[in-house]
């Protein structure tokens, strides 16, 4: 048999791990699961019964296991620091759900910890792995749209009050905030991977009457990018029943619109192109209403990085770019002033 690229353990078995489990199931032979761990043993055993993955009794057992090359950490953000420190000290490579941490300062500290420890850190921004997104990235790298003039990101999602009634959800202590760091972060990361870094933002954030929650469920901002383009962001979880997110890039040679997983391009010379698939994106009442394909490909990319000693498609250092934008939007929303992006 061909040796697998890597053996990974999965830590945390909450709602967000459904596509991870399904993706790992499809990757059998390419990526092995050394085991799963959850504070609730019953939940871990239920996963074992469904997928056949072994169960670890403790985090210490994972750290000490010589057969585990790396871990996928899918716990809430406020549970990450201790786990990352333990796994990095044990030389385990780390693939971590977004966000890196709850604040820019804490996220930077975790990235630097992994760099000092010499372990690979990858972040789960699966939107970058959709076919339409991959094609748009290639077009931007080629300069096919010409010089970028305008960039727009719209995230009209919905979450019911029952979503925010889960203890800790939407709080600064557990999640680090609301729609920006928990939902819009995916689209904003993808946007910045296409446009390059943001320079300044002028934002407004609010909690609408649609929800009872500590943090924001609405955010909007004007953005100036390092490359000279301007743009806007609108993000919310208060739009019932929720719609597909969209990124629109207007260049001097054409316009690209990425809606959900479908890319439509119209060039100034009259040519058109459509790439991608129509599928759920998790923008409605069911946050997990999307296929596992993007997670599967991201996990395989991370395993390939472990096997070759290379960098994953989305390393921890690159993920700090979107954290900096969100931090600036929050600061601007609180002060009402235009602020520089760190």
Image (cartoon, helix red, strand yellow):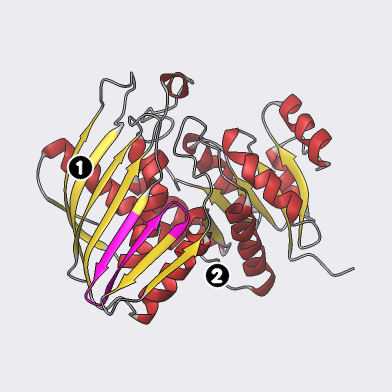
Whole-percent x and y of residue 297? 62, 60
Whole-percent x and y of residue 192? 34, 61
Residue 227 falls left or right of residue 177: left
Residue 12 falls left or right of residue 46: left
Residue 250 drawn in magenta: yes
* Numbered tag placed on residue 311 in the rendering: 2
Residue 211 falls left or right of residue 286: left
Residue farthest toward the right in the current orientation of the protein: 1
Marks 2/1: CA–CA distance? 32 Å
Whole-percent x and y of residue 336? 10, 40
Residue 228 versus residue 200: which sits nearer the camera? Answer: 228
**Mark 2 touching mark 1, by CB under 8 A?**
no
Residue 55 falls in image quadrant:
top right
Q: Is residue 246 above or below residue 30?
A: above
Residue 331 versus residue 136: which sits nearer the camera? Answer: 136
Task: Decide whether the magenta segment is chiefly helix, strand or loop.
Answer: strand
For the record, the magenta segment spans: 247-262
Q: Is residue 72 above or below residue 310?
A: above
Q: Which residue is mark 1?
A: 331
Q: Residue at x 19, y 47 (%)?
A: 221
Whole-percent x and y of residue 23? 68, 51
SS category of the residue bearing label 1: helix
């Amino acid at each position: 048999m061909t040796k697998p690229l890597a053996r990974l353990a999965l830590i945390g078995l909450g709602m967000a791990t459904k596509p991870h489990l399904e993706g790992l199931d499809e990757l059998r032979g390419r990526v092995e699961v050394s085991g799963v761990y959850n504070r609730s043993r019953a939940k871990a055993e239920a996963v074992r019964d469904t997928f056949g993955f072994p169960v670890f009794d403790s985090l210490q057992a994972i750290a000490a296991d010589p057969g585990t090359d790396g871990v996928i950490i899918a716990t809430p953000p406020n549970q990450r620091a201790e786990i990352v420190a333990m796994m990095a000290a044990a030389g385990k490579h780390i693939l971590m759900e977004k966000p890196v941490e709850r604040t820019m300062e804490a996220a930077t500290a975790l990235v630097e910890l992994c760099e000092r420890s010499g372990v690979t850190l990858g972040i789960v921004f699966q939107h970058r792995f959709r076919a339409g997104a991959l094609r748009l990235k290639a077009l931007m790298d080629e300069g096919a749209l010409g010089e970028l003039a305008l960039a727009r990101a719209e995230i009209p999602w919905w979450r019911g009050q029952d979503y925010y009634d889960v203890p800790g959800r939407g709080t600064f202590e557990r999640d680090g905030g609301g729609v920006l760091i928990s939902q819009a972060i995916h689209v904003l990361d993808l946007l910045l991977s296409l446009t390059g870094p943001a320079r300044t933002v002028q934002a407004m954030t609010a909690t609408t009457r649609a929800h009872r929650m500590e943090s924001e469920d609405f955010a909007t901002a004007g953005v100036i990018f390092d490359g000279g383009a301007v743009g806007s962001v609108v993000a919310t979880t208060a739009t019932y029943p929720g719609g597909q997110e969209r990124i629109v890039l207007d260049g001097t040679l054409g316009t690209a619109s990425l809606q959900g997983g479908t890319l439509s391009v119209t060039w100034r010379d009259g040519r058109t192109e459509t790439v991608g698939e129509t599928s759920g994106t998790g923008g409605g009442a069911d946050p997990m209403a999307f296929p596992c394909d993007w997670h599967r490909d991201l996990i395989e990319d991370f395993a390939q990085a472990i096997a070759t000693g290379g960098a994953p498609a989305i390393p921890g250092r690159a993920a700090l770019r979107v954290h900096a934008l969100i931090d600036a939007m929050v600061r601007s929303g609180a002060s009402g002033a235009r602020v520089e992006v760190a």
